[in-house]
Amino acid sequence: MRRVSGTPAARIALPFIVGAIGLAAGYLLSVSLSGYFVFLAVSAVVAAIAILGLGIVTGSAGMIALCQLTFAAVGAWIVSLLNVLNAPGGFIVWLILGGLAAGVVGVLVGLPALRLRGVNLAVVTLGFAAAADVTLVQIQFPGSTDGVSVLRPDAFSDDRSYFFFSVLVLVICGIGVYFLQSGRWGSSWKSVAFSERGTASVGASVPGSKLTAFAVSATLGGVSGGLIAGQVGLPFASSFTPIQSLALYVLAIMSGAYLIDMAIFGGIVWIAVPELLKRWGIPQDWGFVIFGVLGVQALTSGSNLGQSIRNAWWKRQAEKRPVELAAPLAEAAGRDAVTAAPPATAPAPADPSAAPVLVVTDLGVAFGQVKALNGVSLAVPPNTIMGLIGPNGAGKSTFVDAVTGFLPQHTGSVSLDGRDLRGLSATARARLGVRRTFQQDRVPPTLTVEAYVRFVARRRLTIAEIDDALAFFGCPTARTRLQNVDVGTRRLVEVAANVLARPRILILDEPAAGLSHEEHLELGARLLQAPARFGMSIVLIEHDLDLVRSVCSTITVLDFGEVLASGPQAEVLADPAVMKAYMGETEML
Amino acid sequence: MLQGALAGLAAGGLYAVLAVCLTLMSRLVRVVNFSQAATGMFGGFVAVWLVSHAGWPIWLGSLVGVLIGGALSALIGLIIATWLPEADTTTRSAVTVGPLLLLISLSFILFGNKPQPFSPILSGPAFSIGGVVVSQVTVATVVLAIVVALACRLVLTRTSIGTKLRALSERPTTAELIGIPARPLSVAVWAVTGIISALVIIIVAPSQSNDATSLSMLIVPASAAALLGAFRRLDLAVIGGLVLGLLSGLVAQIDEVSFIRNFLPFLFIIGFLLWTQRKEVWDAAR
């Protein structure tokens, strides 16, 4: 499906075409199905919308949410209330308001979840579902005691046309989710599911990502609940029990509901399983027993139906076309030159008169009694590469964490272009232009290279710009899926994406780990050009002294958390203390 | 007022025992077991069926029920220990949502969705102080909660099995490499907590709303209580359970605020999470 979407125009048109086909199919079904099946079909569509929402929060954002039908109940409750009040605007407006109300409730439930992850969130949502269920039984839906049935929209008042209406809502929701998933929000959801630190380091807000996922998911839940209110007229609490929410969660997990087609499939399964059991004369409760068993299978194997099918399909395609390296025509010549020429160009010496970009003064980090960093001061001049070297455990990565805002308890000061960064979060620092890469793999494998680059860069990029930077660093093409890229190359993509963000300073934490020696040299040659070409300073943490020598104009050596030496390359490397710390005592003898 | 609070204490003891089980599971086998109450519920229902339909004596039926609760829990543990030995807590915990759903539905099929005619093992007042009656069930659950917590603490800190269990929970692979039988031990933890949960549910169920859903959803107040000890500390889990029980008993007495009774565990959870997580914490150490 994605291969068709080569050009941007096709990419935008595709969901609308699929939506139009869906609408046409919905119309045909609405006129051809028998009355009973039309009612079932509405239920399937409604369930699909709820599962679509669940797919965002559980599938994309990787959180456990066990109260989707409680959000649906909120939507249904609001629609019933507005119906009883005879509010202006009619059903469609009520439906939207119901969805929005559920979204607000979702944010409120999600707010404590901002700092929470995983299990705690599951406990919160299950607690909410259980509490809301009991309350709902007590207070009932507005109008249910007097039998005031919810009025459907005039144009869709009978069951057949109401089914078509629900398909229309599903198509709108599906298209909306498609664009959200392929946009910044979608990338932030997938990123936060993979790594919170990675998400914050590229200037995306971790709480914001979680909250938007929760809000969108709850809104879709609310819309689905509103549709139920219109479908049955008098909604009852028994349609929104916690057990059903649990079953819906399990269904979303095993079908892979973050894929839109699988959410629709999930909606059909949701209705088909109990219906089939009923026809075969088996108690319908067996349906949830089956869901339970399949859910355990899906959760233990970590796989789901939709992703398995796609992986099989992609694997077949990948066999036909192996991962290609990005090399646009305009760049090909220059690229060859880079590869062919040995990295002979010496690093440009720093301009001593220019004001430094990054100034670190008396930086200290203590973990209990252990002083990981103590009185570290250094200044990075503009458009240069500074090497940060030192033996293992010298505090290099702690330095990166402290400068980029991951260790707010540090002492001393860090300033960027004269601006003190004290009190700023990792996200805020990244947005100001302090970027970093990680020693560990923090590149979410669920994204494509292009989506990842756009997410990291946080600015409008033309596809030519992306291709250019990818080719420059020897990365795979923009359309490659990151899950097909080896970890060493992923780190190159990470570097390229962060360079495209045009930061003031980019701190590379051992970017060459996992690359071969030749790739090391190539990376060095590219890094050497990066400050001038992209306009930034780089701090390079590296163990390979050859690479450091060929790239860095200034070097700072850390040892036991303190600066051993700092200054121009030749001076620092000739310093006997550095030799002793870095090479070991024996080398000196 | 005091009578109301003490009436809640029986439930509080139940929450506390389940919270101790949850804490143990979280510490020793890295799982927040959402089916903790459900396995106990299922064992309890089997016991009721054996007594009321098969005519078994209460003690025998209860014994079999408790063992079935333990066996179900062990089975879930076996599945998780076999297929997800190295996975993180979230993934392992998510798996237990499946059995929760399955056991509730299965009990609907086997036993119907009505409350079960539990014959009380314990009934009647234990003693009364100043006109306030304390039932035997209250005494039993509170004592059970404290005894279980103390026993677990002793086992963990004073015995070699306890040392092995702690090693296993913190470094599963390392523990296995030095010869600690990882899978049997974790399954044993599952079985023991399953037995304890089933036992306490059989004791308390006659005096609670005891349909399958209500009993399984006891997991919510229980995890609220366990959260007080951050799923780490047994003593705080016990206190959390008792306090939560007292509070809901109290709230139920006052008409103006009785509507928040349903939301009490939820508010308890949120309050504590907001407090304990007020500082920014990252998902990985580095």
Image: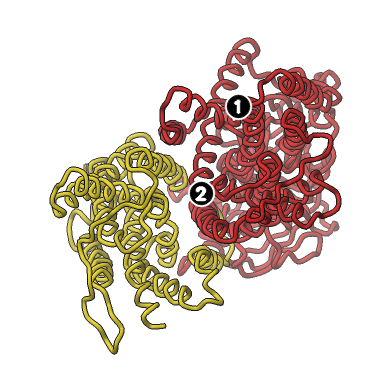
Chain colours: A red, B yellow
Give the total number of marks visible in the rendering: 2
Q: In this view, does A177 lie above or below A558?
A: above
Tag 1, which chain?
A
Rendered residue at 68%/50% (across/down): A75
Relative to A419, B210 lies left or right: left
Q: Residues within 10 Å of mark 2 (few under 14, many from 20)?
A: many
Q: Position of residue A375 (x, y in %)?
A: 60, 67
| Residue that numbered label 1 is attached to | A265
Q: Is residue A19 above or below residue A55?
A: above
**Residue type at mark 1?**
Phe
Q: How far apart are marks 1 and 2 (CA)?
A: 22 Å
Tag 2, which chain?
A
**Residue type at mark 2?**
Pro
Q: Can residue A72 be seen in this view?
A: yes
Rendered residue at 86%/53% (across/down): A88
Q: Does dot 2 land on a helix, a strand or a loop?
A: helix
Q: Position of residue B82 (x, y in %)?
A: 32, 35
Residue at the far top in the pictured view: A320
Residue at the far bottom in the pictured view: B130
Q: Earlier in the sequence, mark 1 or mark 2?
A: 2
Q: Residues within 10 Å of mark 1 (few under 14, many from 20)?
A: many
| Both labels 1 and 2 in a single chain | yes
Please state which of residues B226 and A34 is positioned toward the viewer in this rendering: A34
Rendered residue at 36%/43% (across/down): B112
Q: Where is residue B255 in the image (x, y as percent from the top left)?
A: 52, 76
| Residue that numbered label 2 is attached to | A242
Report which quarter residue A545 is drawn in. Answer: top right
Q: Is residue A490 visible?
A: no
